[in-house]
Image: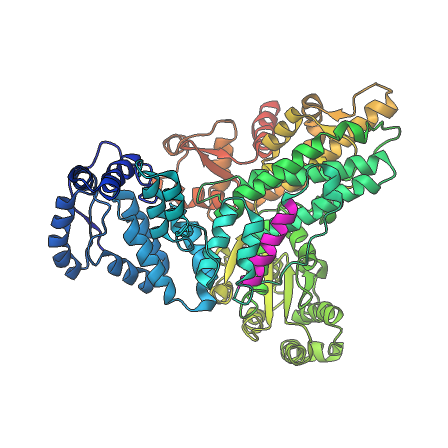
Amino acid sequence: MALIFIGSELPEELPEELPSELPEELSEELTGGVAVGVAVGVAYGVAVGVAGGVAILRPENWLMGCYLSSWLLKQRGLLTSRITVVPLPNVATLLENWLREDWQAGIYNLNQILEYSLQFIAVIKAINQAIKKIPDEQLIYRFSQLSEITKDWDLVKYCSASLRDSLKSRALDGFFLLLPAWKRSLKSRLNTDLRIDTFPHAIAAGFWYLYQENPSKATEAFQVTRSLLYGEEMYVLATILTTLEQPEDWQDIVTINLPSFPSPPYLRSNTWEVMNKFQTIIANVQEIEQATTIVRRSTALNRAIGELRNIIERGGKETEKDKFLPEAERDLIIKIAQKWKSSLETIATEVGDITITEPISSPYVIGDPVFGQLFVGREDILRELKELWINAAQVQSVILYGHRRMGKTSILRNINSCLDADIKLAYLNLQILGEVRQGSSEIVMAMSDEISEVLDISAPNDTDFLQSPERTFRRFLKKIEKEMTCQGLIIALDEFETLEYLIEEEKISKEFMKSLRSWVQMSPKIGFIFAGLHTLKEMSSDYFHPFYASFSRNILVSFLSKPATNQLLESPNENFTLQYTKEALEEIYYLSNGQPYLVNLIGFYLIRRFNDYRFNQKIKTDDKLTLEDVTAIINNNFFQQGSYYFHGIWNQAATSPDGQQEIIKILAPYQQGLTINQLLETSNFTESEIEPIIESLKRHDVIEEKDNKYVITVELFRQWVTNEYYVAQEKN
């Protein structure tokens, strides 16, 4: 819808406040003139009032708008004045129609109106009229959208408070000739408070109070709307925030007992993720008080502070791309987290220093799936899977892909801990099948065994599978669909590219892929998750192509974030007592870029170095791992230990499109990277040839673009390539 803005010349600077905060001159000149007329009945007062009105309200601008607006409205355009605050005819009606046609787009249009005009009164009128026509069950969701999209929170406020009474109250403040007693008498007849007498008023008040960091008042407002969709969620959230805001010191946190959380699906899933973190923090603080050993108390304190730091870092992001928490409660949650963090930091010295008297068993896991506190930084992927499996109308099938040792198996093995009891997951690693001498029978028997164990439903006998594997498995799926008591079943096939290898080696028939596709599409209660190095689109063989439409999402398993990397290093388990210096953490993240296998490998070697120095060589050291320690362990032994990972990335780059390894070798000597032109000059590729190579390497996290240069993403891999293909060749 076109927006046409006509009026006098723009002032050099747009006013910072909208008409809900009337300019002081308007209040003083306009109301002052009228007050004189009321108080003394002289022409002077009337003259001042009229002159003030003419000067401030700009009636000539309003009259021109009236003349032109009727024609523009017929053209589906909109005339708004940049100067007069007086609502133009029919503007509110058109704005209301926009909101009724498309609420979200309408709010964006209102933002534009307010940015380039003073038609705030018309905007508020339009919103309030549109809200009257919204069904009750949609009200909270619509107000949630308004609070996230609007650039002016007064729009939310005046969906509850009376704008007319508020303007009158401000005008009375400017009547300087009125006696104070008269002013109080007149203002007592006005209601400028937020109202909770209707659903729309109460919802708007609730969101406004959250934004104003007043959760107790928000609780009162949302109490009125508990019967609506998302009403109980918002009421419980406001109640919890009220409770979290109250502690004055860490001992107050110990006594907190939060109410039960509402059941999903959630309107504000990210906020509830943070509320779960606060629940964990409370448990850790309670352990600080109850633990009988310094190790347990110190560990609990570190975990609590680490969780709070994570909330502050993630929640404080304000850009549209990185925003994690809804704006209404974001500042309040961060304020609470900062307050708790400061309180806990004051007792750090009271918890006591820990002296390490015996060698430390390394908590870091190399190569195998990780569990417990070692499984960090994958909340976004788990949240996405929950949305696809729990909050969806039917169980969706998913591809989980990423290069070797990135943590795909760890995700699959930890999914059950975050799923509802109504969703079951059966896991099978296809690599354990070995040579597969019985064809597809071995695959479906292994799948059936895992499903049978998870659902406690007996599987067909092996003879049936050996005689007719695909048909028997299909019948088994139909059986479990009827008999399973849970909401859905997820069948997880890890190392999915093993099937491609088995087909190429003629261990199984290509026809097996058609059967697998039919099983994926068979039931809304049964979904598959395939984990491997590639997306289906990248699978080289034609028999994978029919799968494209069967999977709703390709989810990339990429690097851990910096906070998650630090959490993995500093808190791998409850009894870990070593500390890292800030410089050591920075260097580890620089070298690994958060690659989980490499982070664990570095941690493993650091523990081994510490034990060797302290207990074998009897060298006195602090209980801290430093930058010097990190530098010392990155040697030939480290690269040999990590060779499976490095060779895995290198060999994957040998697949289609050709030329990936050559580009990696060209980039390896250049720590700061090369531009596309430099790559073209150095290589033998044309621009059209190099483009798919670059895209494939980027898609698989081997290289990335920084400052218009392509660099190898993981510094340790760059060093390995340099040593393997340059230093080694020079020695030869």
Residue 149: % across, % down: 40, 50
The residue shown at (56%, 75%) is 522
Q: Tell me the magenta residue range.
A: 230-244
**Is residue 222 visible to us here?**
yes
The quadrant the N terminus occupies is bottom left
The residue shown at (88%, 39%) is 292
Please state if 438 lies on the left or on the right of 78 as rendered: right
Q: Is residue 223 above or below residue 282?
A: below
Residue 663: % across, % down: 47, 37
Q: Is residue 486 above or below residue 579?
A: below
The colour style of the image is rainbow
> Across the whole image, how many numbered discs are drawn on residues?
0
The residue shown at (33%, 36%) is 16
| Residue 243 magenta | yes
| Residue 168 magenta | no
Viewer-proximal residue, 447 or 20? 20
Please state if 64 lies on the left or on the right of 229 as rendered: left
Viewer-proximal residue, 247 or 51? 51
Viewer-proximal residue, 75 or 518? 75
